[in-house]
Image (spheres, rainbow, N blue to C red):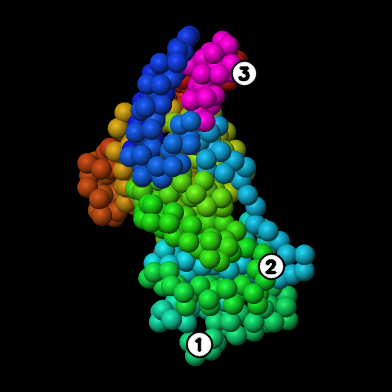
Amino acid sequence: MAFEGLADRLQNTIQKIRGKGKVSESDVKEMMREVRLALLEADVNFKVVKEFIKKVSERAVGQEVMKSLTPGQQVIKVVKEELTNLMGGEQSQIAVAKRPPTVIMMVGLQGAGKTTTTGKLANLLRKKHNRNPLLVAADIYRPAAIKQLETLGKQLSMPVFSLGDQVSPVEIARQAIEKAKENHHDYVLIDTAGRLHIDGELMNELKEIKELSNPEEIFLVVDAMTGQDAVNVAESFNEQLGITGVVLTKLDGDTRGGAALSIRSVTGKPIKFVGMGEKLDALEAFHPERMASRILGMGDVLTLIEKAQANVDEEKARELEQKMRTASFTFDDFLEQLSQVRKMGPLDELLKMMPGANKIKGLNNLQIDDKQISHVEAIIKSMTKAEKINPEIINSGRRKRIAKGSGRTVQEVNRLLKQFEEMKKMMKQMTSMTKGKKKGFKFP
Ligand code: GDP
């Protein structure tokens, strides 16, 4: 996961100060020394680190902390607030033009993920905001870019405007906007040309497109894995072209996080979205506060809830809950539950959003393999209807048959049956524990 090293170090540091009833200046100094090292090691820009440490130190030895009843907690609150400010405070929205279509220029260097992000953004605009975007293939220099965007358009069943690679990008943009007006598209996403390095020719072309299309947003796509290079690229693009926001891609990789923490301070422009994978639904709005919370091990419950709301069928969830309460939970229900959870994304990523997850030993190294879940699904699907409802009837002959049918071993079938039995037992216990107690019980 991104930020892992930084998160570990910061969490260890704040752990030391958390319970303190008194915080002295030298405690703060010691803590800031560790925070400073942690940030530098995460490849955060050194000027940004300096400024951050200064702000936190001032506040931490100030009245708001020293006079509070829980100074330790208060210092952590200050760190969290300043970390949030560093990444841009409030989450920013996408602008809307007074008169449609709203034009968004997508810019960036080759390989950063610009074309993929154009497709993801179109998907997000339609799915979450009910918009009807037109994709525009204006990267005429990278031979495969037009084809790539067309393929993405096909996958999304969305139109892609292209005039091949012999017409100038400025002309393509002009005609695309006309077309969007004719066909009532409310957004136009222009996938502009990338280069390996920033050069004058590229900038001139982008400036021309900007002048002509009067975009509401210019999103710069940068690769989080490139660390401070991404920050430098952002600075150059902002100075030369003027950008309105940044999309930070590949945050699903194990980047140290320096780019995410430096871009806003260095360029003054916010990170608006983050790419969390190669698939078309792997683009998330960037929430600085939630990210700060995740880095400090306080979990990201809001994102978790949003994911659940977007993917879990409430009706079915209620039915399942009822079944759990009455312990009439069958293998079919189990399968249903698995498929609902799976829709929310990789399980290990979800677990890490739980508050306190960092304290669960080994979670960081835990790799929940999607394949394992597929194996469980295969085993359940090889059961007969009667077996799924009444697993007790599954004798050794049936176990062999199920193993064969699912392509798994008898041991795996045995293990699943045992786990299922234990789960049901636990459900029974929980139901009897909560019986009569309307308020439910507290989670540890
Ligand atoms: P472009 O040259 O900037 O248009 O880059 P592409 O859109 O072709 O992307 C380059 C590579 O990065 C492709 O293999 C993408 O699948 C991959 N990519 C883009 N965004 C992400 C992301 O958020 N996470 C991961 N893991 N890969 C990404």
Q: Main secondary structure of the magenta part?
A: helix
What x and y, as percent, mark residue 342?
Answer: 45, 48
Q: Which amino acid type is marked by label 1? A: Gly
x 43%, y 69%: residue: 198
Residue that mark 1 sits on: 164
Label 3: few (<14), some or many (≥20) within 10 Å? few
Q: How many marks?
A: 3
Residue that mark 3 sits on: 439
Mark 2 element type: strand
x 25%, y 43%: residue: 412
Q: Which residues are magenta?
A: 55-78
Location of residue 359 with respect to 22 vertically, above or below: below
Q: Is residue 212 visible?
A: yes
Question: Which is more toward the observer, 184 or 259?
Answer: 259
Res. 394 mark: none
* Whole-number angstrom distance, CA of label 3 to CA of label 1: 65 Å
Residue that mark 2 sits on: 102
Along the polypeptide, which appears first: circle 3 or circle 1?
Answer: 1
Question: Which is more toward the observer, 321 or 191?
Answer: 191
Mark 1: C-beta under 8 Å from nearest atom of ligand 1: no
Mark 3 element type: loop
* Whole-number angstrom distance, CA of label 3 to CA of label 2: 50 Å
Mark 2: C-beta under 8 Å from nearest atom of ligand 1: no
Mark 3–mark 1 contact, CB under 8 Å?
A: no
What x and y, as percent, mark residue 111?
Answer: 39, 67
x 59%, y 77%: residue: 208
User: Is residue 429 left or right of 375 when viewed as pictured?
Assistant: right
What x and y, as percent, mark residue 166?
Answer: 49, 90
